[in-house]
Amino acid sequence: MADNGDRVMCHACGGVWLLETGEDGHDTNLRCPHCESDATEIIEIPPKPLRQNSKQNRIRRQ
């Protein structure tokens, strides 16, 4: 199952779009909406790291 925010990239035309998952949990839009190719790849976008509190950073630097 894909994580929220994953993308699909088309190797034929270079198009990129959001991955959609159906009610049954299967990916529903792996065919390129631009050129109709099925030479696609799911690109997982890693979550952004949590930013540390700037006050904690200043304390550590002292």
Image: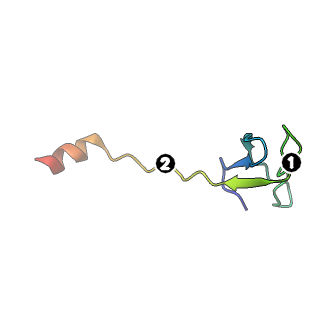
| Coordinates of residue 31 in the picture (x, y in percent) | 86, 49
Image coordinates for residue 18, horizontal then vertical, percent: 73, 43
Bin the neighbour count of mark 1 within 10 Å (Cα to Cα): few under 14, some 14-19, many 20 and up: some
Q: Nearer the viewer, residue 41 or 26?
A: 41
Three-letter code, disc 1: Ser
- Decide if residue 56 is on the left or right side of residue 19: left
Instruction: Give left or right: position of 33 versus 41.
Output: right
Percent of width and height locating residue 35: 86, 40
Number of dots carrying numbers: 2
Q: Where residue 27 sits: x, y (%)?
A: 81, 56
User: Secondary structure beneath disc 2?
Assistant: loop
Numbered tag placed on residue 54 in the rendering: none
Badge 2 amino acid:
Lys
Residue that label 1 marks = 37
Residue at x 82% of width, y 52% of height: 30
Q: How far apart are labels 1 and 2 at the CA level?
A: 31 Å
Question: How are the residues colored?
Answer: rainbow
Q: Are marks 1 and 2 in contact (CB under 8 Å)?
A: no
Q: Mark 2 points at which residue?
A: 48
